[in-house]
Amino acid sequence: MSTTDTTASGASDFAIDPASMRHLAEARVNVELDTGDMVLNLGPQHPATHGTFRLVVRLDGERVISADPVIGYMHRGYEKITEFRTYPQVTTLINRIDWLSSFANEVPFVAAAEKLMDVEAPPRAQYIRTILTELSRIATFLLFLGEMGLQVGALTPAFYGFRDREHILNLIESATGGRFHPNFNRIGGLKDDLPWGWLAECRSTMQIVFDACDTFENLVLGNEIFAARCKGIGIIPPELGAAYGVSGSNLRASGVDWDLRRDGDPYLVYSELDFKVWTHSDGDSFARYWVRLQETRESARMVLQCLDAIPAGPIMTKVPLIIKVPKGEIWVETENPLGQMGYYVVSKGGTGPFRVKIRSASFSNVSILPWLLQGVYVPDVITILASLYFILGDIDR
Amino acid sequence: MVALEIGWGTTLAIKTLVVVMVIPLGALILGYTFLLKMMSHMQSRLGPMDPGGFHGWFQLVGDGIKFLQKEDIMPADADKKVFAMAPVVVVLSTFLVFAVIPMGPDLVVVNLDVGIFYALAVSSLSVIGILMAGWSSANKFALLGALRAAAQLIAYELPLLLAVIGVAIQAGTLNLQDIVLAQQNGGIFGWDVIGNPYILTQFVGFGLFMIAAQAELSQTPFDMPVAESELVSGYMVEYTGFRFLFFFIGEFGTAFAFAAIAATLFLGGWAIPGVTGDLANILGPLVLFAKLMAVAFLMFWVRFTYPRLREDQLQALAWKVLIPIGLVNILVTGILKVTL
Amino acid sequence: MPKLPGLIGGLGITLKTMLKPAVTVQYPHEKETPAPRARGVIALKEENCTACMLCARQCPDWCIYIEGHKEQRPPRREGGRERSVSLLDRFDIDYSLCMYCGICVDVCPFDALFWSPEYEYSENRIGDLLHDKQKLGEWMATVPEREPLEIGAEPGKTAKK
């Protein structure tokens, strides 16, 4: 259906007997059907979309008239699967929702269960959880800084992103046993304490992170061609973004000063850390890249603060061997790397949750695409998709 | 050494062999050195190491053999004859360019008086091949890529030409052999140890030529036609097997040819000042090869570092920035040539 | 000194990276050693296992297959009751299903399952990925020593398995 109904509005200017103009009206109808739009199917297999994401785009030459995202190619039925699993099993599975920052997916769920059970993890466990969450944030953003350069055309930054991410993944592996899926949280604390020498290695890895951020700033952010491609592209107005549910760095790049680590319900040890929330006033793709670069540096500084302040002590409180969460329901949301993630856990006193509703960040981030992509060029579609930074596992669950 | 007495039949055979062999060999060497090894090291990795034992030198040859034994697939809706002819047209233009590049005082396949004019004219034939490929593929992505390519390649012919005109004015001739000899025998600032490579005086022209050559080769930052992350190879997307091999050879062969033209026009080609006669005939190809690799290093270095420009920004750069600079360059060169 | 345009700075970075050695580890000629805690494969210590089925029940993928039987043993003291002992007939882990979560290793009350960082056990047929109890026993040789914990951990503890 054509979105430009110029014929319908133009007819009101004619004050002529319609019957005598009938042939013209029919001619206009034929012209209307023959608009010459081209329908382009971006995906579900396409290098620009991070996973099986399909975008049906109507083009007029190189301009987009309308864009419809089609999601669901990777739906794995998470909310249904949690109805038949126990709490430790669910913790294992939800690692895989947003697989790039998998530790950050476990944190809100475990926090929800702990709140319903009215137990609190000991301070050392909270600090280690914060360090690992920020490490997964750094890992996700390093990949973003690299692959957004790739989507815009530069081949090299992507490799630097993967190369520098390896150090973070090795850190996570030496502490938890898994590079991508740590499965380290337990209700009441953590599975195990850190191995010998981990804190010193973490400190030296943060220096690598700072150097990587400087490299990306010089190679990508300072590049005039990158600026020409990204400035002014895909501007999200702050009120519209908030109305659509866009969250995380995307909204902060539009000037909205909102970060759940500082403004939401206090969780982990963020209330004791001194960190800055970075915002940018432009709201275009360049601003989103800039905000994520600054947030990577800020996360590295937060990790260094945690390393200085980490207390000694146990990492697990006393919880029964078979975890049974008492009846109740609770909503917990956290600031994940991709945006705002939340779990609504309904428990009826069993060994597993009765129902879990997962609010994933990318699902809402992607909902703004039909509005955002109107009237842009095809290359800008790719730039906007890359700058919004969604993960398919997070959209489809 | 005595110059060899060869009959015209043998000469013709040798010349044909040179024209046919040098482009695939050049494409192979350029592809291996820059695409496989230099790009890998710029990305902090090693590239192919196993094929052939020593740092993977056999990789591209193996790739070529692999492409040759693949099934010949054509899309069902494709225009069969045009689809088959398109890669041939693209590669043919590259082979023809190398016929005028001099590799020594006597080593030139055809010594045309309008050498550089012929080279540029023939290299722009590839636009037709690209359009044929994109149209006959019956694929919207291919069509988008081909139309972008046509607009881009035609727009960047002009800065290329204007850069070359500056050199032609300074040398006073269009004959490539005479341009090389002028650079060898000339002097700069009254000092003729290094001859007069035109890059020193025509540096604006050199910059223009490099930018325009980058665009003619559809390399980043001008690779919209083959934007890999959007259109997945653009006009080449439906091509497999040996037809894709033709496009690949065409891409790197044209890079080889443009690097050779740039080395000839701006760096002095096969000439080292003071070396003449039979020694120049032996050293000439090697010297040309070394200068050509230096120019190609620049082209590929830029290719692997920068993101790509959007189509309208690319056109604005050509029409609003490069062509005025080229015209001013010609004006200044003409004035200086007459007055100095 | 005026700031170089970003275009030139970018070229400098790629040139510098080209001149530094590459970070590639050429597997299979060179291999990296994974961390001691890396979850590579699960090893079984058969003498500790009592076929209690806790691991098989808690596995999210149901990839552990256990069969056991009870036997009678003579009483420990004169005139006592006969003891019954559980013996393991079959203990298979299907690594084509296993998602390496570690719940089985955690819940085992008798310390019969251990993690090992060994990762090179790919097979040509999916059926060969079902490791029986003999093969799982062989992995015990690759289980690393329990490593010491970081400063600040509870004193007197070492890493869990």
Image: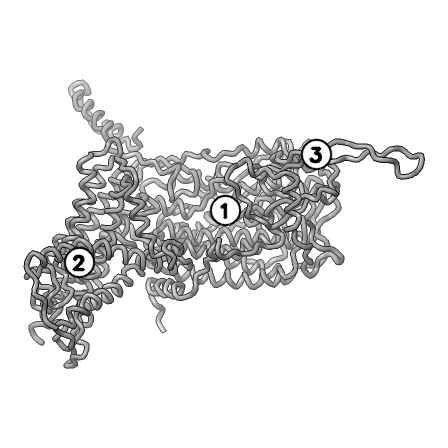
> Could you say whether the residue bearing mark 1 is in a helix, strand or loop?
loop
Image check: C62 left or right of A361? Answer: right
For disc 2, the neighbor class at 10 Å (few under 14, some 14 to 19, many from 20) is: many
Q: Are marks 2 and 3 on the same chain?
A: no
Residue assigned mark 2 = B159
For disc 3, the neighbor class at 10 Å (few under 14, some 14 to 19, many from 20) is: few
Q: Chain of mark 3?
A: C
Q: Nearer the viewer, residue C54 or C49?
A: C49
Q: Which mark is residue A338?
A: 1
Q: Nearer the viewer, residue B244 or A331?
A: B244
Q: Which mark is residue A238?
A: none
For disc 1, the neighbor class at 10 Å (few under 14, some 14 to 19, many from 20) is: many
Q: Position of residue A198 (x, y in %)?
A: 62, 59
C67 shown above or below A155 = above
Q: Which residue is depicted at the point 63% across and 47% down?
A: A184
Image check: A102 left or right of A123? Answer: left
Residue assigned mark 3 = C89
Type of amino acid at the residue the image marks with label 1: Leu
Q: Position of residue A186 (x, y in %)?
A: 66, 45
The answer for how far apart the CA atoms under marks 2 and 3 are is 81 Å
Q: Nearer the viewer, mark 2 or mark 1?
A: 2
Q: Chain of mark 2?
A: B
Q: Nearer the viewer, residue B259 or A317?
A: B259
Residue lying at the far top of the rendered structure? A19
Type of amino acid at the residue the image marks with label 3: Asp
> Could you say whether the residue bearing mark 3 is in a helix, strand or loop?
strand
- Assess whether mark 1 and mark 3 are in contact (beta carbons under 8 angstroms): no
Type of amino acid at the residue the image marks with label 2: Pro
Quarter of the image for the N terminus of chain B: give it. Answer: bottom left
Image check: B59 left or right of B198? Answer: right
Q: Are marks 3 and 1 on the same chain?
A: no
